[in-house]
Image (cartoon, grey):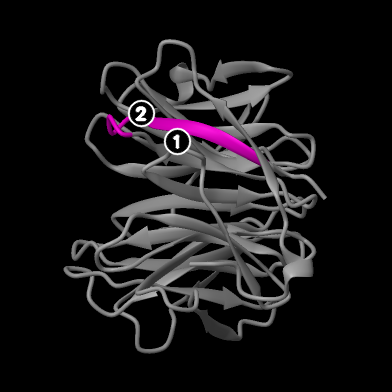
Amino acid sequence: MAEAGTAESVTTYTYQTLDVPGASSTIFWGINDFGELGGQFAVNGGAPHAMVYRRGQFEPLDPAVLGTYFSAAGGPNDVGWTYGAYADASGTQHGFVMRGHHFQNVDFPGHVGSNVDGFNEFGTILGVYWDADGAFHGIIRRGRNWDTPFDVAGAAETYPLGINDLNESVGYWDTNPKAPAPHGFYRDANGKITTIDVPGADNTVVFAINDVGQKAGYYWSAHGPDHSFVETNGHFQTLDMPGAVSTLVTAINNFGVVAGYYTDANHHQHGFVATPSH
């Protein structure tokens, strides 16, 4: 899909691959305004483990806390909190937020599984929970346990993926989890939800929103690969990592720098950062 809008609105990007040394897979789920990244890596196709990238170095997040079964991290946000999910020995998934040695387990009571997909500078948690049917539902937690569940009207499942410091959030929804055809959504701070679809695409996932309202994610059609996009004031621009088979943007900071992962011709996943040139 070509960029939708005027020629003056086209932004060019400089792409950089970043892989955990020795990893068979590297995926980023978050980026802050200092260029710090959060995500996951795997070695020899094993279980993914949470990590961050700071000061030019990759750092695994504490396996003594998150275990060795599965973990993944988003953020860090601009005050240093990472967040995400991990699985325990029984396979139950829990959300978490952490900074330094401070760790907080996040579970949404009464539900089978929990995940934290966003944690802004004011302590608002954007999460997902699911029950025995496996369908995802959104939830926002303010304070210690002030939970607000939400679903897109008419959706079978709702999966929020990103939140900014204005408490605006984004994600995707679909009507049939067994044959998903997702649509993106935007939820304002008052809870009003609108659908976002990339023009000409069959499927849209909105993964991130920054404080100036830019949204980022990826889209695909029935017989095509994944392409990424940044939406600015209603204009959609495609991003594709040069030479990649598919490109998935999962994070955007307030300078419009995006991060995510791409798949090469050998089906390996690599982390990347794309920086606007103007």
**Residue closest to the far bottom:** 154
* Amino acid type of the residue that numbered disc 2 sits on in the rendered structure: Pro
Residue pictured at 78% horizontal, 52% vertical: 254
Secondary structure under badge 1? strand
Q: Which residue in the structure is indicated by mark 2?
A: 48
**Residue closest to the far top:** 22
Residue 5 image point, x, y percent: 67, 76
121 on left or right of 149: right
Residue 191 position by quadrant: bottom right
Labels 1 & 2 near each other (Cβ < 8 A) = yes
Residue 177 image point, x, y percent: 23, 69
Q: Is residue 152 above or below residue 218?
A: below
- Camera-side residue: 10 or 54? 10
Q: Is residue 221 magenta?
A: no
245 on left or right of 192: left
Main secondary structure of the magenta stretch? strand
**Residue closest to the far right:** 278
Q: Residues within 10 Å of mark 2 (few under 14, many from 20)?
A: many
Closer to the chain start, of discs 1 and 2, is: 2
Q: Is residue 27 above or below residue 18?
A: below
Q: Which residue in the structure is indicated by mark 1?
A: 72
Label of residue 175 in the image: none
Secondary structure under badge 2? loop
* Amino acid type of the residue that numbered disc 1 sits on in the rendered structure: Ala
Q: CA distance from mark 1 to mark 2?
A: 7 Å
